[in-house]
Amino acid sequence: MLAKELYDFRSVIQSQGIIFCYSGYITEPVLTGIGEALKQKLYLEEADKTTMRNIFAIFVEQMQNVIRYSAEKEPPEDTDDVNELRYGILNIGMENNKFFVTCGNKIQRSDVERLSDRLTDLQKMSPDELKSLYKQKLRGPTEETSKGAGVGFIEIARRSTEIIDFGFLDVDDDHAFFALKAFV
Amino acid sequence: MDNIKIEGTDRSPEIDFEFSNNKFSIRGESYPEDVTAFYGQIIENLETHLSDMDGGNVEFNFELIYFNSSTAKVLMGLFDTLEETAEEGVSVTVNWYYDEEDDTMEELGEEFAEDLEAATFNMKTLET
């Protein structure tokens, strides 16, 4: 039973073209480790360098989003504790001959509208508009709610070869699940 | 100012700041856990040094394989500092090395260079 159960689980994942799947607490060393394996896999797939670097870049920005912003965390209260753990799920795979990186994590429901507006704007932008916004954000002050440069989503949109896909699902009174998918 | 030499790691670049002859290099990959912790002090030292210069030549070499968006913010600030230094009468040469098979890194170099007027900017391919 054990082997069958786990094999079925693996088959479900593989049937969706998923090559890497991780669900759990995401830390910087987890990012480093999966990142190394991802680079090796892309190298063995003989992906061209631009594609490799774009996938890797999207992967890094997505993972760092979870590490910094996931609302599902231990301990639950806000602290500056470096041992804080944040939960997220990552899938990297292939669909219609394109690589994809999907990442998901819980967020506060109060953040859904802001995030949704921001990503909808990015979906509508041309490459030139994305470039201008990117440079503007790089020069601007770091946003208060942002622990990074606040340009992660723009970076993801710029490196995707298709329009980024995203969605939200309410999971309880306070939280929604946020998913973001990018293709290269 | 003492020269700064930091070995590269998987996630942070090699830093080679030779204040003594005004030659500065950043090489490798840059997606450190904490960008401010990595770059904060060295960039501050560099800015102090450059603002104290009275004429002379500065060479800055970027040989980056990959950098994340938090690093991009640091680089943008650095480019602005280099341009301001050139405007003050220092001869500034910026060399952007990129892997010729990596179109994105070439484009990023061109984008950073768009705002340079007083500083000289060169695109160079990395020997691989």
Image (cartoon, coloured by chain):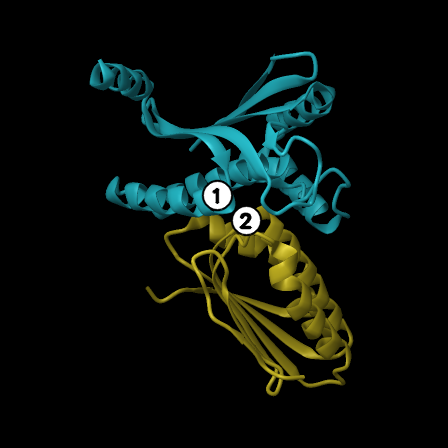
Chain colours: A cyan, B yellow
Q: CA distance from mark 2 to mark 1?
A: 7 Å
Name the chain under label 1: A
Name the chain under label 2: B
The answer to whether any part of residue A160 appears in the image is: no
The amino acid type found where label 2 is placed reads Asn
**Element assignment for label 1:** helix
At x 65% / y 45%, what residue is drawn? A81
Nearer the observer, B92 or B11: B11
The image position of residue A16, as x and y in percent, is 33, 18
At x 60% / y 74%, what residue is drawn? B93
- Labels in figure, total: 2
Q: Please indicate whether residue B30 sits to the left or right of residue A42 in the image.
A: right
Tags 2 and 1 both on a single chain: no
The image position of residue A57, as x and y in percent, is 48, 43
Label 2 close to label 1 by CB (< 8 Å): yes
Nearer the observer, A2 or B89: A2
The amino acid type found where label 1 is placed reads Ala
Label 1 neighbourhood size at 10 Å, few (<14), some (14-19), many (20+)?
many
The answer to whether any part of residue B56 appears in the image is: yes
Q: Choose top left, top right, bottom left or bottom right for residue B91.
A: bottom right
Nearer the observer, B128 or A167: A167
Q: Which label number is shown at residue B68?
A: 2
Q: Please indicate whether residue A25 sits to the left or right of residue B126 in the image.
A: right
Nearer the observer, A103 or A24: A24
Q: Which label number is shown at residue A57?
A: 1
**Element assignment for label 2:** loop
Look at the picture and state if A55 lies above or below B14. Answer: above
